[in-house]
Amino acid sequence: MSRLLLTLSKIKIHPLFWIVIGISIITAQFKELIMLFLIVLIHELGHVAGAHFFSWRIKNIQLLPFGGVAEMDEHGNRPLKEELIVILAGPIQHIWLVALAFILHESSIISQETFQIFMFHNVVILLFNLLPIWPLDGGKLLFLVFSLKNPFIEAHKLTILFSIVSLLMFIFLILYFEPSQLHSWMIVMFLLFSIIMEWRQRHFLFMRFLLERYYGKRQSISKLKPLVVDETETIHQVLLKFHRGYKHPIIVRKQGKQQTPLDENELLHAYFKDKRTSQPVGELLYSY
């Protein structure tokens, strides 16, 4: 019960949401708005339930006039399978919502019209969230896919660039089908703002990724992925090669021969504690 109350206390409703409620009452669309609100809330609580299961730190749950976002205080150092489950825990809620709506309809508890409206909004929210645009669930799945083969910073950059292309395609669809819909342009502005902020903060996010590894998240990483680097590469250049979901033994090549591997924490210590950011990694062979 205390965990539930703590979760509910983290729900934050955007001020614009209340304005939209007022407009919906005036335009007789209050019932539809309540449906959207409940669907979005259950979707986000699905993410929260998955995060709680893996003991993730939940920052807050934002409910916007056109959707919601569950923000986690995690920075890319959880196992990729965990992240996949937490991401899919939102969309999977739409399955039982369909089943529930069908039972209520068949039991004559809700009308045919209400059932059809609910089904429409449920499917639209599900498909919209699976668009490959950050910070939607589809964008986060895209980040995971890119992370399978690319270092963190490259996977993050590819996710943002792909999100921009997908958003442009989404804008073209809006221009073709419903250019006068204010609701659609509000969504576009939110997505564009989110992508811009993600791009501007990319170096800060990378530092959080490294700091979290340095200060205690290494125990959650069980897979090893050796990094073979040249002795002349700087510590910073080597850190740019770090992947999500892997611990990296650092194998330094010196005069064509591979030396005894360094632990990744030795690089992180030299980078954050000793501020030796531009030092060649080969010099660490003599320091530890």
Image: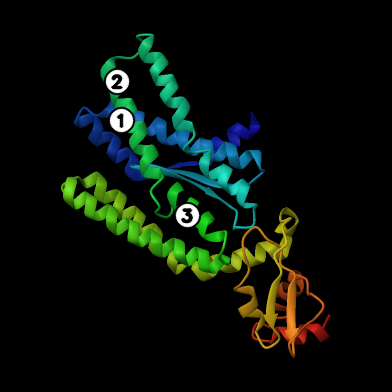
Q: Position of residue 91 (x, y in %)?
A: 46, 38
Mark in the foreground, 3 or 2: 3
For the point 60% across and 58% down, which residue is it?
76
Badge 2 is on which residue?
114
Q: Secondary structure at mark 1?
A: helix
Q: Quadrant of the N terminus?
A: top right
Q: Position of residue 36 (x, y in %)?
A: 35, 33
Spatial CA distance of label 1 from label 3 is 26 Å
Residue 187 vs residue 239, the one in the foreground? 239
Secondary structure under the numbered disc 2 in the rendered image: helix
Q: Earlier in the sequence, mark 1 or mark 3?
A: 1
Mark 3: amino acid:
Leu
In the image, residue 24 above or below residue 267: above
Side (left or right) of 38 relative to 177? right
Q: Please tell me whether mark 1 or mark 3 is closer to you in this view.
A: 3
Residue 175, placed above or below residue 89: below
Q: Which mark is residue 18?
A: none
Q: Quadrant of the C terminus?
A: bottom right
In front: mark 2 or mark 1?
A: 1
The mark found on residue 142 in the picture is 3
- Pointer 3 or 2: first along the chain: 2
Q: Percent from the top left, x then y, of residue 141?
A: 49, 51
Q: Work out how far the residue at label 2 is from the one at label 1, CA to CA, in angstroms.
A: 10 Å
